[in-house]
Image (cartoon, rainbow, N blue to C red):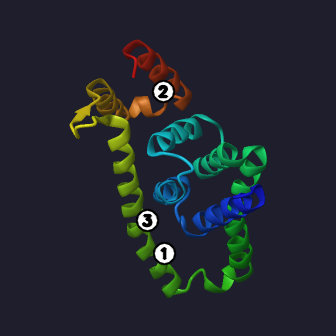
Amino acid sequence: MNDFSLALQLFWEFFKIGLFAVGGGPATLPYLVELSEKTGWFSMEELTNMIAVSESTPGPLGINMATYVGIETLGPFGGIISTLGLVLPSIIIICIIAAFFAKVSENRHVKAAFGAIRPAVTAIITIAILGICKVTLFTVSETGTITPYTNLIIFSVITLVLLQIKPLKKIHPALFFVFGAIIGIIFKF
């Protein structure tokens, strides 16, 4: 496959993701899992690394991941093409909606449609997160034995519990990243 064909495929795949991933960056995860299986551009392990890098860098998760895949696949030009493919559907849709927003915003059918979409998007994101947790929190040996990363699971549960304490919710998120990095270095996650 030549670079032009690959660039078109990158654009098209991310255009479709941008068109159908309703709900922001996390909603792109199921599509990225499918893209991995379909194209072989990256593995599930690489996907978890992309999520880690995308979550640690400024900017929306979906855009960061599109850029990451594009750069890994076709270099900087691929990053631009895949990112453009991801955001273009939103730009088009926003322009169309803005033109008609005043007329349809109070329509009961529109409200009902968005109400119906929310649970479906939640289910799709949950399935993707469970798949990523399986790769991140467990290791599968060649014999099929599943071994949990016990320290990582315990740390994750403790973090979730601590985040429910009201005073800790006021702490800047950057401090949680620093704390997580220190714990990761100490326990070699």
Q: CA distance from mark 2 to mark 1?
A: 34 Å
Q: Residues within 10 Å of mark 3 (few under 14, many from 20)?
A: some
Classify the position of the N terminus by image quarter: bottom right
Q: Quadrant of residue 157?
A: top left
Identify the element where label 2 is drawn: helix
Please count the marks in the image: 3
- For marks 2 and 1 on the same chain, the one whose residue lies earlier in the sequence: 1
Identify the element where label 3 is drawn: helix
Quick one: which residue is furthest to the top in this view? 186
Locate residue 154, reporting x and y percent. Answer: 27, 28
The answer to whether the residue labelled 1 contacts the one labelled 3, judged by CB atoms less than 8 Å apart, is no
Residue at image location 76% in from the left, 55% down from the top: 3
**Residue 121, numbered label:** 3
The answer to whether the residue labelled 2 contacts the one labelled 3, judged by CB atoms less than 8 Å apart, is no
Quick one: which residue is furthest to the front in this view? 1
Residue, disc 1: 114
Residue, disc 2: 176
Q: Of 183 and 159, which appears nearest the observer? A: 183
Q: CA distance from mark 2 to mark 3?
A: 28 Å
